[in-house]
Amino acid sequence: MEVGIAVAKVRKYATSNSGDTVEVVERPNGGLSVVMADGQSSGRGAKWISTLVVRKVIALLAEGVRDGAAARAASDSLYTEKGGKVSATLNILSVDKQTNTLVITRNNPAPMLLAVNENIQVLDTPSQAVGLYRDTRPLISEIPLQPGLCAVIFTDGLVHAGERYGQNMDIVTCLEVLLDDEDPTPETIAGHLLEHALKLDQDRPADDISIAVLRVTSHPGDLIRRMAIRLPLES
Amino acid sequence: MEVGIAVAKVRKYATSNSGDTVEVVERPNGGLSVVMADGQSSGRGAKWISTLVVRKVIALLAEGVRDGAAARAASDSLYTEKGGKVSATLNILSVDKQTNTLVITRNNPAPMLLAVNENIQVLDTPSQAVGLYRDTRPLISEIPLQPGLCAVIFTDGLVHAGERYGQNMDIVTCLEVLLDDEDPTPETIAGHLLEHALKLDQDRPADDISIAVLRVTSHPGDLIRRMAIRLPLES
């Protein structure tokens, strides 16, 4: 089996900083975690908040702390720092090689999608952002790693894309169409979802948008780990 | 302009853990850093060491500490923890958006390559691994970000590939050939270097091998940040 992860990220039109932060970290007992946070409001302040939350989570995950405990710690930490006045959404996708499971952690009113082959499930049980209250707990799901598994997490910029123009982003239908193709890569899925959102927003995103897609395939793999990154630079 | 980064990584044959660690982290004032460490010996112990070093560096970089200071701190930290008995090599490649430069930090006896278009320079000024002495300093180079810039860092598994079979890995010639192609992606460069090393090692790498390639192109870019990861899973 092979796990593929893709992240695509764009910032709100005419801002210089995205308020979203996405980082990937190795787990000490094998596997990887993708950590995504969206800080309240936008620009530099929001970036500071999302960075604080993601840093806290990845520092703890790197020490072997479990995902749920890391999310609770990040919430308490932001609550303490800002007196409960500032929130951030938090999603974690972890490939845990010890348990051979995908561990999904969600502190986000926005839903996320989980598919096994073409069977798409919307995880939308009410869930709270971190930082506003003491003792905010994440929703945790744990699913055996298996070929055909696909998880899609995103910040609310994707959910609300096009609203300003009376348009509606139907993420489930988009994913259905993409999964109908034979063996789509996570890059294809993340890229198409983002492009569709940008089209609805007429190429001027009304909010920061971040998407992460994790997909398990039966590809034999070759023992090589690979990572590729593209960073646009204004010149 | 656009910056592309690719990492390719394989572990020593018949070990369950790579002793190398490579992580990418966002810089708080814009840009990214790639941090690569190779812990002394191999397996779990080496992994613990390289993780310690990389964690220390990325935690400091994320707080806005400069690369050289972060490398010195990681060295002192490992020296204090292990009483100067254990070493690790350390390389950092940073895209610094504040200064519009590529900042190269090297604490590694192994050389690294820096090219502008087809002009390849070997950076091989003697340099010490971190952790063995008090006050070990890194070598730092800073180059303006410009299209055609390409930096290649690697752990010594790449340098010594094939030695067991009387073969010799000529990294400079490999890179020359790759850069002769029109606009090779960093993935192509990292992938080909690793494949060539694996061939020389007869597909049983004698040591952990990690390669990171950073390339600046004049591609206009589209304001979307992208990341893709492939993680093989033994099933």
Image (spheres, coloured by chain):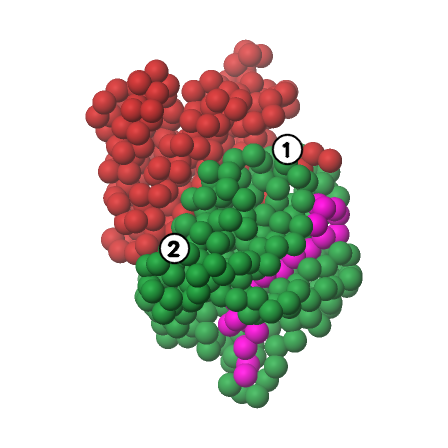
Chain colours: A red, B green
1 or 2: tag closer to the N-terminus: 2
- Amino acid at circle 2: Ser
Q: Residue furthest bottom?
A: B166
Residue that numbered label 2 is attached to? B77
The one nearer the camera, A136 or B36, is B36
Vertical side of B111 occupied by B218: above or below: above
Residue B111, how many percent across, how many down?
A: 61, 68
* Left or right of residue B160: residue B179: right
* Residue A58 appears in the picture as rendered: yes
Residue A3, how many percent across, how many down?
A: 42, 52
The chain letter under disc 1 is B
Residue A167, how many percent across, how many down?
A: 54, 15
Magenta span includes B154? yes
What span is colored magenta in the figure?
B143-163
- Amino acid at circle 1: Leu
Residue A18, how many percent across, how many down?
A: 54, 28
* Residue drawn 54% across the image and 83% down it: B163
What secondary structure is found at the residue carrying circle 1?
loop
Judge the density around disc 1: few (<14), some (14-19), many (≥20) Cα neighbours within 10 Å. Answer: some
Residue that numbered label 1 is attached to? B223
